[in-house]
């Protein structure tokens, strides 16, 4: 027996971008539990997300990669191409856990030559939060399509008492890039294809731009970004906003630095209970619609102790998955819904995990089951520019130049027509490589 334990007494290295002390402590606890079960020691090493690509490239060149890396989506396929990640090892883990238990969108994003480049861990979908109570009272349909959103804006926009929407218009803010990508995706618009840059489809893009102008005209004037949208919604002065799920605990009065003040009580759950959530929207040229998602993965490297690394990832996605999600449940939706025996096991467990800063409560006590279901369902249809074409890196570069934001703002300000805006975006994006 001692010999068996001695054989298993090995150490693997795990890089994580979840480097806040409280989150690191949770990951260390999971590593300790895994060691107690398997005898395999896991060294948990925090790495700042902005440094992750540089460090991985340098470690690969030096033959000193860790065994497992927790990484955002944008690194997965480029690292696989570069020889940093072992897609065969990741596929072994996914196959053992059963691909059917994962959100399809999360797996589709990292599919490569019939394998999966990494194992989907968690993600979040951008959401439209809307005043469900007001929509129901006015007989308005939920904002799942451009047409439904336009109808709501037309009926509810009454500034300064109530803005129909709070459109992102601050050009140098990443929030505007995220919102616009979702609006464009919703109408089937993308600037990339399998061969790189692909000119924006004029009709679809013009339709998306005109829709966004309708939203902007029902918004406060000036440079709007995430902060104004949250403040106006929390004050009861916005019918709809677009936000990440990191707003969910604040919306329910659990964070003193961002209180909902709709009824004068900063700890009130009233606004959370009056809020509906939509994760997928559809434009007139793309009836299937789209969700925009930020996804995270476990990558097993080509330098890994494959057996130990696969065991650790399997554990983190199975027995230890509740601990994995508990690191920050409001921004870690389960990409694995359950097991073959219990298909909803992990989504059910996730809804019981406490969220909040100054006060804590599980999401299931704050939001009704339909909202919880909608939040997690968005990962099924999650999309991002360039992922299916292997051009995520190029699409990311395009967004980072903020060319799209600048041209869209020029159009919103009435300086150019929608058609000229499409031509100008195509001209600028074609020069990025």
Image: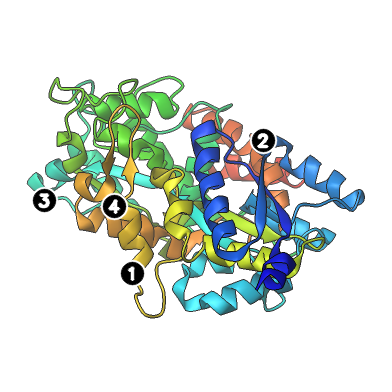
Give the number of the disc on residue 230.
none
Q: Earlier in the sequence, mark 1 or mark 3?
A: 3
Q: Is residue 215 above or below residue 147?
A: above
Q: At x 21% / y 57%, what residue is drawn?
A: 369
- The percent coordinates of residue 153 (x first, y second) are 25, 40
**Tally of numbered discs:** 4
Drawn side of residue 343 relative to residue 400, left or right: left
Instruction: Count neighbours of disc 2 (C-alpha within 10 A) and say few if under 14, some if 14 to 19, many if 20 or more.
Output: some
Q: CA distance from mark 1 to mark 4?
A: 13 Å
Give the number of the disc on residue 352.
4
Q: Are marks 1 and 2 in contact (CB under 8 Å)?
A: no
Instruction: Count neighbours of disc 3 (C-alpha within 10 A) and say few if under 14, some if 14 to 19, many if 20 or more.
Output: few
Q: Earlier in the sequence, mark 4 or mark 3?
A: 3
- The percent coordinates of residue 88 (x first, y second) are 72, 74
Instruction: Count neighbours of disc 4 (C-alpha within 10 A) and say few if under 14, some if 14 to 19, many if 20 or more.
Output: some
Q: CA distance from mark 1 to mark 2?
A: 33 Å
- The percent coordinates of residue 118 (x first, y second) are 65, 64
Q: Are marks 4 and 3 in contact (CB under 8 Å)?
A: no
The quarter of the displayed image where residue 6 is located: bottom right
Q: CA distance from mark 2 to mark 4?
A: 29 Å
Name the residue beneath numbered marker 2: 48
Q: Earlier in the sequence, mark 3 or mark 2?
A: 2
- The percent coordinates of residue 365 (x first, y second) are 20, 47
Give the number of the disc on residue 344.
1
């Amino acid at each position: 027996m001692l010999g068996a334990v001695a054989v298993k007494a090995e150490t693997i290295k795990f890089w994580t971008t979840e480097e806040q002390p409280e989150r690191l402590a949770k990951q260390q606890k999971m590593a300790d539990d895994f060691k107690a079960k398997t005898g395999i020691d896991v060294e948990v090493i925090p790495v700042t997300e902005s440094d992750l690509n540089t460090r991985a490239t340098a470690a690969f060149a030096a033959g000193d990669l860790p065994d497992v890396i927790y990484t955002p989506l944008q690194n997965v396929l480029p690292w696989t191409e570069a020889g940093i990640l072992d897609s065969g090892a990741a596929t072994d883990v996914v196959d053992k856990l059963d691909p059917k238990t994962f959100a399809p969108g999360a797996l589709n994003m990292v599919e490569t030559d019939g394998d999966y480049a990494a194992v989907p861990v968690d993600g979040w979908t951008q959401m439209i939060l809307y005043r469900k109570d007001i929509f129901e009272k006015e007989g308005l349909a939920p904002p799942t399509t451009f047409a439904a959103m336009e109808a709501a804006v037309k009926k509810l926009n009454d500034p300064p008492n109530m803005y129909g929407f709070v459109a992102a218009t601050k050009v140098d803010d990443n929030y505007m890039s995220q919102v616009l990508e979702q609006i464009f995706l919703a109408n089937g618009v993308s600037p990339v294809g399998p061969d790189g840059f692909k000119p924006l489809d004029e009709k679809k893009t013009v339709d998306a731009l005109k829709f966004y102008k309708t939203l902007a005209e029902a918004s406060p004037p000036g440079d709007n970004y995430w902060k104004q949208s949250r403040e106006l919604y929390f004050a009861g002065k916005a019918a709809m906003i677009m936000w990440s799920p990191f707003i969910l605990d604040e919306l329910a009065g659990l964070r003193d630095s961002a209180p909902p003040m709709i009824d004068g009580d900063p700890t009130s759950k009233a606004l959370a209970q009056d809020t509906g959530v939509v994760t997928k929207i559809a434009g007139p040229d793309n009836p299937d619609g789209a969700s925009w998602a930020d996804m995270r993965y476990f990558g097993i490297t080509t330098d890994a102790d494959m057996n130990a690394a696969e065991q650790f990832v399997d554990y983190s996605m199975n027995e230890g998955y509740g601990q994995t999600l508990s690191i920050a449940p409001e921004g870690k939706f389960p990409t694995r819904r359950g097991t073959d025996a219990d298909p909803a096991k992990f989504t059910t467990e996730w809804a019981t995990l406490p969220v909040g800063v100054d006060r804590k409560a599980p999401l299931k006590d704050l939001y009704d089951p339909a909202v919880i279901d909608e939040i997690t369902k968005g990962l099924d249809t999650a999309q991002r520019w360039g992922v299916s074409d292997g051009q995520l890196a190029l699409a990311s570069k395009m967004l980072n130049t903020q060319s799209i934001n600048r041209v869209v703002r020029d159009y919103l300000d009435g300086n150019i027509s929608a058609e000229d805006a499409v031509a100008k975006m195509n001209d600028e994006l074609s020069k990025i490589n």
